[in-house]
Amino acid sequence: MYSQLRICKRYILRNKLKSWKFKYFPDLVDLLVYLSTRRAARRLQGGQLGVLIDSNVLGHSITHETVWVSTGPKKWGDSYIDTGYAARVCVYGPDADSDVYKNVMFLPGIASLAREGLIIFYTSAELRDEQDRQPIGRFRGYGLFDRGLLQNVDIKSIDGYAFPAAGSIWSGRPSAREQQQSRLKNRESDPLYIALIEQMGRKNNLDAWHICTAERHNLFCFLTMDFKLRRIVDANLHKEPFRSMRTRVMTPAELGEFLGLQPIRPALFSYHDASWFVRPDLHHSDNIRRPLRSYRRRSDKDV
């Protein structure tokens, strides 16, 4: 009898704890992030920072994905079926130590400052065109319970939109990528753009245009997680036009350290906007996002 009562009490306490996590834990995490950004907020009281955000930052900002958690085979009539449930898990585990993860940990603070209006995120016509050619889930999440650190952050285009001509490639119409390259070719009268291409190489002409766009609109930095691009820029900082440019090319970690932000583990955001099962004890075994094809079948191999 007493053992049954103890089991019942444990069950009630466990359910109350889960309910508490859903209801109160997000507010506690938000308070932690807010307090961690006060030093940066004081530095930014004199004015806002304009930031052009690269597509890869949006992709890496998705830190929680939907997975199928197996509960094993169960008998259904005369046969056995695999059972389980969908749940939100963090992409990164406690063993994560990649350059991507180290940069992702600075996104909560940067996003918090953006929600306060101290950092203004921008995209551009060519960045939007670049994103429109890719699966939308790459930047917003593929699963129903996916979540990103940049949710509810306003990102507006600084120079409007590009409208590639629609049509099938079988009709002879250039693809969206080819149309974009054609537009960039027509912009080679811009001396800054040409100078950037000369230093970065023509195969990086799209990144050169993004940097040129940020400089032309007096933005503080072009925020990217393309580490190869970052190394190219570093190798040419002593040369023109980089030497005289006001716009910087920075990673989230570099921007966070510049502002005095503290890195915050993305696993803490597991319960934000959660309305279904959350498994904070699980994570992807390789600490990277799952590809789109893995959502076409139910599997718990990634957790």
Image (cartoon, helix red, strand yellow):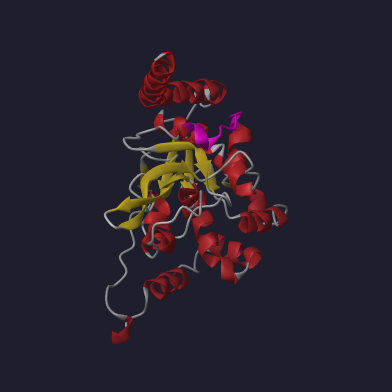
- Residue 11, how many percent across, how many down? 39, 23
The overriding secondary structure of the stretch rendered in magenta is loop
- Residue 209, how many percent across, how many down? 50, 60
Seen at 28% across and 86% down, the residue is 171
Seen at 65% across and 64% down, the residue is 199
Work out which residue is located at the far front of the displayed protein and give it. Answer: 1
Seen at 44% across and 25% down, the residue is 30
- Residue 7, how many percent across, how many down? 42, 21
- Residue 241, how many percent across, how many down? 63, 56
The answer to which of 167 and 288 lies nearer the viewer is: 288
Q: Is residue 121 visible?
A: yes
Q: Is residue 231 left or right of residue 131?
A: right
In the displayed structure, 205 sits above or below 51; it is: below
In the displayed structure, 165 sits above or below 9; it is: below
Q: Is residue 104 left or right of residue 31?
A: right
Q: How many marks?
A: 0
Q: Point out the image quarter for the N terminus.
A: top left
In the displayed structure, 40 sits above or below 303; it is: above
Q: Is residue 235 left or right of residue 121?
A: right
Q: Is residue 123 visible?
A: no
In this picture, which residue range is highlighted in magenta? 259-268
Quarter assignment of residue 15: top left
Q: Is residue 233 left or right of residue 218?
A: right
The answer to which of 265 and 156 lies nearer the viewer is: 265
* Residue 31: in magenta span: no
Quarter assignment of residue 152: top left
The answer to which of 196 and 61 lies nearer the viewer is: 61
